[in-house]
Image: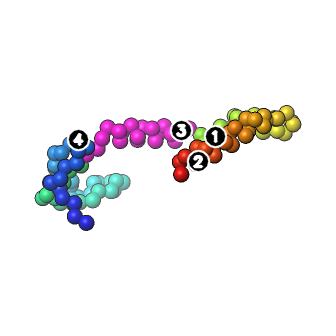
Amino acid sequence: MYIDPKIQFPRDSQPDPVKGTRNSTAPAGGSSKSVAASPASDGDTVSLSSVHGEVQTLAASLDNVPDVRTDRVNGLRAQVDQGHYQPSSYKVADAIIREYTRVSLQA
């Protein structure tokens, strides 16, 4: 597959060529990896949108959200153990239909 470096796509916000600033030696300490590469003579370009930073921020904050709401689960578990949990059959049926509809629309 050949990618023509002269073609610019409409969404390219930074058509400036990337400068060859990579070092050919590894940094002292050896903790981070660096790959040496010679700059392309065709003028390769790289473009990152501002959305990338937002996605990274959201992904990092998502790591702080628990998968299971343990306080809610423990409260319901206590109700079930004591025999006080009596869910509404109407609400259960409605939730099943909504979930089925949501999954069907995604497929």
Query: What mark, if any, has residue 32 been given in the picture?
Result: none
* Magenta part of the chain: 47-65
Q: Which residue is mark 4?
A: 13
Q: Which of pointers 1 and 4 indicates the residue nearer the eye?
A: 1
Q: Residues within 10 Å of mark 1 (few under 14, many from 20)?
A: few
Residue at left offset 35%, top offset 41%: 52
| Residue 21 is at least partly visible in this image | no
**Residue type at the position of mark 3:** Asn
Q: Is residue 60 magenta?
A: yes
| Residue type (three-letter) at the residue carrying disc 2 | Val
The residue under label 2 is 103
Q: Residue at x 23, y 41 (%)?
A: 13
Vertical comparison of 43 with 95: above or below: below
Kindly check if marks 1 and 4 are in contact, taking CB atoms under 8 A apart as contact: no
Q: Nearer the viewer, mark 2 or mark 4?
A: 2
Q: Secondary structure at mark 2?
A: helix
The Cα–Cα distance between marks 1 and 4, rounded to whole angstroms, is 41 Å
Q: Nearer the viewer, mark 1 or mark 3?
A: 1
Q: Marks 3 and 4, how far apart in space?
A: 33 Å
Q: Residue at x 63, y 43 (%)?
A: 99
Q: Secondary structure at mark 1?
A: helix
* Mark 4 element type: loop
Give the residue at mark 3. 64
